[in-house]
Image (cartoon, coloured by chain):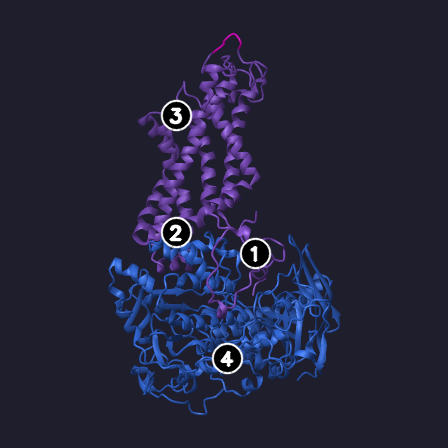
Chain colours: A blue, B purple
């Protein structure tokens, strides 16, 4: 596929912003070539310059304090320094863009078909506009992006589309004028896995059916494995490695690429492997280290070699470029991985610390008699010292369960018993004691710490509330900071002085302040970069072993959950649909929803990824105000029967310790595969 | 990924190296004075190991680095000292004349060595009169701002945090106060209770809190959804503690701005009242009443009778404004000073 003629050639593209701290080099001499029909993925963590470089390609980075140098040639025309009018022409028809937050980009008061037709017609001279032709093209486009019944659907409004369909409609709009290049900036980042699978499917269809070149910008090496022909890895503004997808995943050569791949939790790896982690933080782009900018975090760092001079980019195999001066010496070292073996499977015969039975939570809706059925008849137990992974897409009620366990909200019905305490009927005095037994770590490391308080006040607050004397608090805070891998002297500093991963560690330190027995982790790593995420996950598993903690780990990422959990419960629309030991659930999922979730998750290996069959669930999760009758999943289930719409399947044991709520548990019939 | 989010933090990104969690079993280093420890240094060369310092210390340091605020405080304190020390100055120096001492033969003359700010049409020393009047104006401005801020913040915080029926009742009360024609209410209240300074202060405060209450309510409603509020509840904090420690400090910006505006408004509304004859009654004076007494001299040789009280109000307002700025920055740990 990479034999097409070059359509976009980027040579030595640099972007520098003048800041108060000196020049900020966001992109450093980036070069790549994109050919017709090819797909190139630019992968990097936040701050790596991947988005700035793509905006610079479109001429969208400008301003008095910005310098763009180098060359961007689109179809032979130079774009750097080109007049705005010419750039607009290219943006509309040559290169079109799909944004991350495309879900909000459709105008709610116009029909979807009308909006797509409009984007076709604005680029035509007024005299040549042909509404009928535009309408035909709209149907063609909706069909291309896999929207069923494109003729009828074009006449609907955005709110009548599902989330995934809206994202696909946005892609259709971007394709409206047959662009030579489709630039997608984190197109799946904000989406649930089943929706993400729908979108990735569209990209594959585009690749098969058109010769539009695809430029994918993402932080997720897993997402691109199945879609990209070629992958370019960026770090601190510069290209550190580039290769075709096969070689990059098979023989990652730059220590950073290796580190990234090692730190990625994978669905095909069992619990017990410690994630590789890249120590430290990305450098400040205003103060890049001399020589290799990855040097300070690299375990293969050799003083005098790596920090001496400009690092050359070498071609270690045809088309495989690596920017590392020690590449010949380190090829065989597994440099970045400090792997520690842990007991892979653990005996789960400890008595339960958490018992939940028949838990129900309904939220009333204002000025209405309806209620949101957030959690319906949920029962589970968590043995002491183990981790329960709670998985599901957004809106499935998993965060509500977290808040119910902590009694941050009141349950409607059911029993919650933690460490022998009946959580729902605690006296004020017992509630204070309970606050020391069960704690929570939140998702957003930016919103979960009060920006006005010092780290000492934040971490020490639960202690102060428990009446500890100030002198004891200071010592304990230093101890806690040390425990979570932070400088124990950083208590005087404010949250904004820390990076995302460090903030999450502060949140963990706060949760551990009173030596709890249960810690509920509500998506603790989903807001973090991959290399940082691994450090936090390792910290959590390590803390669990040392302190004998019991975890309820909530996440939408099945790979992370597999990595950390002993047992896993899958939630859908407020119900637990499958619950069992992690190994069993991941190896032999019995509920069709679990199977779809697992198949939608990406594995960072193009060979496995291309060979796998993906079950694509149509549509969205139904509204929890009016959940479907019978089995709540029947509206999206690939094997649903009439019976499923009437009779609700109970959660029963499928094999010992493995509970499933389905009328037809077991492997899916083979003919239900990807379309 | 958005451009702003990605780069905003980077220049100042801290550089403490995370200690390997597996090796973290070693006893924690005792927290000692940072000056004795060669702490890790960032790429900018700044010493990152800060000695344990109280939040109050950090607050004070940030405030003291705000030059305009410091100048404003000095000026305002000087102004307060002059006005409230006018009695003493009168008794022990010849700088200030007794209040209301007339010299009808002299009449209105411009500024001179003997009368720094000149004299008014009754031959009173205008500088002395300004000081006596300043007592009223400053008191009204500051007390009204303080009172209305306390009322507005309390009502807004309760309505925003507890929501539901409390929100309904308090916000309808706010609406009720907003639709009252304030000048008429003022005039009636002053006629009924008499025009003493204390009455004016309370009536003005009762009429100025609504805007702030609405702002605070909106702020509180957004802040209480943040996860750190839930974290505090999970830690066992009571609602009042959460409001005081976690919610209100994060609303300080708009509160300070509103308080500054209230000072200005109070001084100006008091002058309007004086003009209508409902403000402070003679022999008590205020900058507002002096301004309205002198309004006829605009464009004449005696225009200085307008300029001086006007300037005094302006300086007070500017001072309060700068102090407000300084406070807002001092409360914000992100301000890089």
In this picture, residue A648 sits left or right of residue A136: left
Marks 1 and 4 sit apart, C-alpha to C-alpha, by: 38 Å
Q: Which is the main secondary structure of the residues drawn in magenta? A: loop
Front-most of residues A283 and B212: A283
Q: Secondary structure at mark 2?
A: helix
Front-most of residues A9 and A469: A469
Residue corresponding to mark 4? A266
B166 in relation to B301, above or below = below
Q: Residues within 10 Å of mark 3 (few under 14, many from 20)?
A: many
In this picture, residue A259 sits left or right of residue B164: right
CB-based contact (under 8 Å), mark 4 and mark 3:
no
Residue interval drawn in magenta: B102-106
Residue corresponding to mark 3? B278
Residue A511 placement (x, y as % from top left): 40, 63
Q: Residues within 10 Å of mark 1 (few under 14, many from 20)?
A: some
| Res. A169 in view | yes
Chain that bears disc 3: B
Q: Of the residues under marks 1 and 3, which one precedes in the sequence?
A: 1
CB-based contact (under 8 Å), mark 1 and mark 3:
no
Q: State which mark lies toward you, 1 or 4.
A: 1
Residue located at (48% from left, 18% from top): B89
Q: Residues within 10 Å of mark 2 (few under 14, many from 20)?
A: few
Residue corresponding to mark 2? A470
Q: State which mark lies toward you, 2 or 3.
A: 2
Marks 4 and 2 sit apart, C-alpha to C-alpha, by: 44 Å
């Amino acid at each position: 596929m990479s034999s097409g003629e070059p359509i976009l050639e980027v040579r030595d593209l640099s972007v520098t912003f003048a800041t108060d701290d000196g020049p900020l080099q966001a992109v450093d001499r980036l070069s790549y070539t994109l050919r017709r029909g090819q797909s190139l993925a630019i992968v990097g963590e936040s701050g790596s310059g991947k988005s700035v470089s793509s905006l610079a390609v479109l001429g969208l980075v400008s301003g008095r304090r910005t310098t763009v140098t180098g060359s961007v040639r689109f179809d032979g025309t130079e774009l750097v320094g080109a007049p705005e009018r010419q750039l607009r022409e290219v943006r509309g028809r040559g290169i079109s863009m799909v944004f991350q937050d495309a879900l909000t980009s459709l105008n709610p008061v116009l029909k979807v078909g009308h909006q797509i037709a409009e984007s076709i017609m604005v680029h035509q001279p007024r005299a040549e506009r042909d509404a009928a032709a535009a309408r035909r093209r709209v149907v063609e486009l909706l069909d291309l992006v896999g929207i069923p019944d494109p003729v009828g659907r074009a006449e609907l409004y955005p709110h009548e589309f599902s989330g995934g369909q809206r994202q696909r409609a946005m892609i259709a709009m971007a394709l409206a004028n047959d662009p030579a290049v489709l630039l997608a900036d984190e197109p799946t980042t904000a989406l649930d896995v089943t929706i993400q699978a729908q979108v990735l499917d569209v990209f594959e269809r585009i690749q098969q059916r058109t010769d539009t070149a695809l430029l994918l910008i993402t932080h997720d090496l897993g997402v691109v494995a199945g879609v990209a022909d070629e992958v370019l890895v960026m770090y601190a503004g510069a290209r550190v490695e580039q290769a075709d997808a096969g070689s990059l995943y098979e023989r990652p050569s730059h220590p950073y690429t290796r580190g990234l791949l090692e730190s990625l939790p994978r669905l095909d790896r069992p619990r017990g492997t410690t994630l590789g982690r890249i120590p430290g933080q990305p450098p400040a782009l205003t103060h890049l280290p001399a020589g290799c900018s990855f040097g300070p975090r690299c375990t293969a760092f050799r003083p005098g070699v790596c920090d001496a001079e400009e690092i050359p980019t070498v071609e270690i195999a045809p088309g495989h470029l690596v920017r590392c001066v020690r590449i010949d010496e380190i090829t065989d070292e597994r440099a970045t991985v400090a792997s520690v073996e842990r007991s892979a499977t653990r005996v789960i015969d400890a008595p339960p610390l958490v018992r939940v039975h028949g838990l129900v939570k309904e939220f009333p809706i204002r000025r209405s008699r309806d209620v949101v059925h957030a959690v319906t008849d949920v029962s589970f137990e968590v043995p002491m010292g183990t981790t329960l992974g709670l998985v599901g897409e957004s809106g499935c009620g998993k965060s509500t369960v977290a808040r119910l366990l902590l009694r941050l909200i009141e349950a409607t019905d059911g029993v919650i018993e933690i460490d022998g305490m009946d959580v729902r009927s605690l006296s004020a005095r017992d509630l204070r004691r309970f606050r020391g037994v069960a704690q929570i770590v939140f998702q957003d490391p930016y919103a979960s710490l009060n920006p006005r308080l010092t780290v000492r006040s934040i971490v020490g607050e639960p202690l102060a509330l428990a009446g500890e004397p100030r002198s004891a608090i200071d010592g304990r805070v230093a101890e806690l900071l040390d425990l979570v891998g932070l400088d124990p002297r950083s208590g005087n500093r404010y949250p904004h002085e820390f990076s995302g991963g460090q903030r999450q560690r502060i949140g963990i330190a706060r949760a551990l302040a009173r030596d709890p027995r249960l810690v509920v982790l509500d998506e603790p790593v989903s807001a973090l970069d991959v290399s940082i995420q691994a450090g936090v996950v390792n910290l959590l598993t390590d803390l669990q072993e040392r302190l004998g903690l019991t975890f309820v780990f909530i996440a939408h990422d099945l790979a992370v959950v597999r990595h950390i959990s002993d047992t896993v419960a899958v939630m859908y629309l407020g119900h637990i649909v499958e619950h069992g030991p992690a190994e069993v659930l991941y190896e032999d999922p019995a509920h069709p929803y679990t199977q779809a979730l697992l198949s939608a998750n990406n594995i960072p290996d193009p060979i496995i990824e291309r060979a796998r069959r993906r079950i694509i669930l149509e549509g969205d999760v139904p509204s929890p105000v009016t959940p479907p009758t019978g089995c709540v999943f029947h509206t999206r289930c690939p094997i649903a029967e009439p019976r499923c719409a009437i009779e609700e399947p109970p959660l029963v044991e499928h094999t010992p310790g493995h509970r499933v709520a389905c009328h037809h548990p077991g492997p899916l019939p083979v003919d239900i595969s990807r379309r | 990924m958005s451009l702003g989010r990605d780069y905003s933090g980077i220049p100042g990104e801290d550089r403490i190296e995370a200690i390997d969690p597996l090796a973290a079993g070693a006893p924690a280093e005792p927290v000692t004075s940072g000056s004795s420890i060669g702490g890790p240094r960032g790429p900018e060369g700044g010493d990152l190991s800060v000695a344990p310092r109280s939040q109050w210390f950090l607050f004070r340091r940030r405030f003291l680095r705000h030059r305009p605020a410091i100048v404003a405080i000095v000026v305002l304190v000087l102004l307060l000292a002059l006005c409230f020390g006018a009695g003493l100055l009168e008794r022990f120096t010849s700088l200030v004349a007794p209040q209301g001492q007339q010299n009808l033969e002299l009449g209105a003359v411009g500024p001179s060595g003997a009368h720094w700010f000149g004299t008014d049409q009754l031959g009173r020393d205008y500088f002395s009169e300004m000081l006596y009047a300043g007592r009223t104006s400053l008191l009204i401005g500051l007390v009204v701002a303080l009172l209305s801020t306390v009322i507005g913040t309390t009502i807004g915080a309760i309505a925003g945090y507890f929501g539901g029926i409390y929100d309904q009742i308090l916000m309808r009360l706010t609406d009720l106060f907003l639709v009252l024609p304030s000048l008429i209410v003022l005039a009636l209240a002053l006629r009924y209770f008499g025009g003493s300074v204390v009455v004016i202060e309370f009536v003005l405060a009762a009429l100025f809190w609504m805007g702030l209450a609405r702002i605070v309510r909106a702020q509180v409603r957004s802040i209480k959804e943040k996860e750190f509020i839930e974290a505090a509840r999970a830690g066992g904090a009571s609602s009042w503690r959460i409001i005081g420690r976690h919610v209100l400090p994060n609303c300080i910006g708009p509160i300070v701005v509103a308080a500054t505006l209230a000072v200005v408004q109070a001084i100006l509304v008091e002058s309007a009242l004086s003009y209508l004859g409902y403000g402070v009654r003679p022999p008590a004076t205020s900058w507002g009443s002096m301004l309205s007494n002198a309004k006829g001299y605009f464009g004449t040789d005696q225009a200085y009778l307008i300029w001086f009280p006007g300037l005094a109000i302006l300086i007070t307002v500017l001072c309060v404004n700068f102090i407000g700025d300084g406070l807002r920055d001092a409360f914000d740990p992100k301000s890089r000073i």
